[in-house]
Image (spheres, helix red, strand yellow):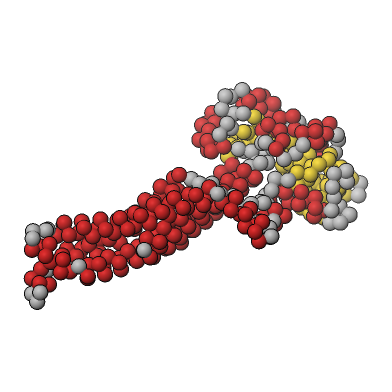
């Protein structure tokens, strides 16, 4: 029973933890990509000048849902309270609402105001909170562009009115600010010029393959970068963390496998006389090994089945269980102001379940081989000599 419960506990914990990590990965991916395009097309030697024809060509392709120009730069934002660095993004709002799902985080009416109003800006919620401003207030923006005056070269400054505040629920809220492409071109001194074109594909996960195909069709002076390349370090760290957690939690299954070894070893010791009798009656070594392998696999198989079933049920009901614990304890386990989430995300992946069950079965099989081999080596003459 201890061996069975240990195997069930290991399998169930692995399924639940990997489901939670899948949920966090999806949350992170969805929030980060809320304002990040699936891919970008840029010029290798600088900005794009005749970008309108390239945009029209890209939009006409059936494998591209939307394409919009953009300008990007590091800037300083100043309020009466503080001066902070930010990532300024100049977007063509008429196209970018569909291009990167911006309408999911910013009210469409405010996006329209950003396009119509001169010198309007939309700030991330954490950035606006740190600056101590809200919609209707003004901020001073300093761009890394020099303006030559009789007094010397000075960085370009402009007063912007905060049109709206967006909240993605990720680190972008503390770093990004949006302005219209028209204002960004004037501010950066790049009239009629953009840094690149942002693309959206029908399938987010097909972006690498579609990007490779599209790159082969683009001129040599253009380069294409998809989201897995621009955020490679972040998502590689997430995958590495999931791999390491899987290996660590497999130790729980390994401990249960050692319990199976000890259980079968004790059974072999207790049944030595019975094994000897079976051998004298004609049972072969392979038949004796098969008996104990079957016993061990039934033991581990029952534990794996119980663990897989309970783990899947827990993973599917984890958000409800979290809410129940919060109401029972009277505390907020996940404060959205700290964690960007209000409950524990979880996504059960069938591939993970099959992988865990397969690894557990392999460990269970390996655990039965040593006791079964020892049972097959029993010498009937030695055991039955004094019986």
Instruction: Locate residue 291 relative to residue 243 in the image: left or right.
Output: left
Q: Residue furthest bottom?
A: 386
- Residue in the foreground of this view, choosing between 28 and 212: 28
Quadrant housing the N terminus: bottom left
- Residue in the foreground of this view, choosing between 301 and 233: 301
Residue 362 image offset from top left, x and y in percent: 33, 55
Residue 153 seen anywhere in this rendered image of the structure: no
Q: Quadrant of residue 136?
A: top right
Q: Quadrant of residue 223?
A: top right
At x 69%, y 26%, the residue is 52
- Residue in the foreground of this view, choosing between 49 and 139: 139
Residue 230 image offset from top left, x and y in percent: 60, 45
**In the image, is residue 13 above or below residue 68?**
below
- Residue in the foreground of this view, choosing between 118 and 308: 308
**In the image, is residue 131 above or below residue 204?**
below
Residue 291 image offset from top left, x and y in percent: 21, 58
At x 77%, y 37%, the residue is 107
Instruction: Locate residue 120 relative to residue 222 in the image: left or right.
Output: right
Instruction: Locate residue 36 relative to residue 373 in the image: left or right.
Output: right
């Amino acid at each position: 029973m201890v061996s069975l419960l240990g195997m069930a506990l290991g399998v169930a914990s692995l399924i639940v933890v990997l489901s939670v990590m899948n949920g966090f990965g999806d949350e992170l991916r969805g929030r980060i990509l809320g304002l990040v395009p699936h891919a970008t097309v840029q010029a290798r030697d600088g900005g794009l000048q005749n970008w309108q024809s390239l945009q029209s060509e890209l939009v006409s392709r059936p494998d591209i849902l939307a394409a919009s120009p953009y300008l990007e730069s590091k800037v300083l934002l100043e309020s009466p309270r503080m001066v902070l660095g930010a990532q300024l993004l100049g977007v063509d709002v008429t196209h970018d609402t569909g291009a990167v799902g911006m309408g999911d985080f910013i009210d469409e009416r405010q996006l329209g105001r950003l396009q119509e109003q001169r010198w309007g800006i939309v700030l991330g919620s954490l950035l606006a909170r740190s600056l101590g401003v809200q919609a209707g207030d003004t901020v001073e923006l300093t761009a890394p562009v020099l303006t030559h005056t009789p007094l010397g070269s000075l960085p370009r400054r402009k007063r912007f009115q905060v049109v709206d505040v967006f909240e993605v629920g990720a680190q972008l809220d503390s770093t990004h600010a949006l302005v219209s492409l028209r204002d960004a071109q004037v501010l950066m001194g790049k009239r009629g010029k953009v840094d690149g074109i942002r693309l959206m594909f029908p399938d987010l996960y097909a972006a690498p393959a579609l990007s490779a195909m599209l790159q082969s069709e683009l001129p040599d002076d253009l380069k294409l970068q998809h989201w897995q390349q621009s955020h490679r370090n972040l998502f590689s760290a997430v995958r590495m963390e999931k791999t390491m957690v899987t290996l660590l939690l497999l130790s729980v299954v390994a401990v249960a496998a050692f319990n199976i070894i000890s259980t079968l070893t004790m059974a072999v010791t207790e049944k030595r006389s019975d094994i000897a009798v079976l051998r004298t009656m004609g049972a072969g070594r392979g038949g004796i090994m098969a008996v104990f392998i079957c016993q061990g696999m039934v033991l581990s198989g029952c534990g794996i089945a119980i663990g897989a079933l309970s783990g899947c049920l827990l993973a599917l009901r984890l958000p409800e269980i979290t809410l129940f614990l919060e109401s029972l304890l009277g505390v907020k386990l996940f404060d959205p102001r700290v964690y960007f989430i209000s409950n524990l995300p979880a996504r059960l992946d069938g591939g993970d379940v099959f992988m865990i069950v397969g690894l557990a079965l392999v460990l269970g099989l390996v655990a039965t081989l040593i006791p079964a081999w020892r049972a097959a080596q029993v010498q009937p003459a030695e055991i039955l000599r004094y019986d």
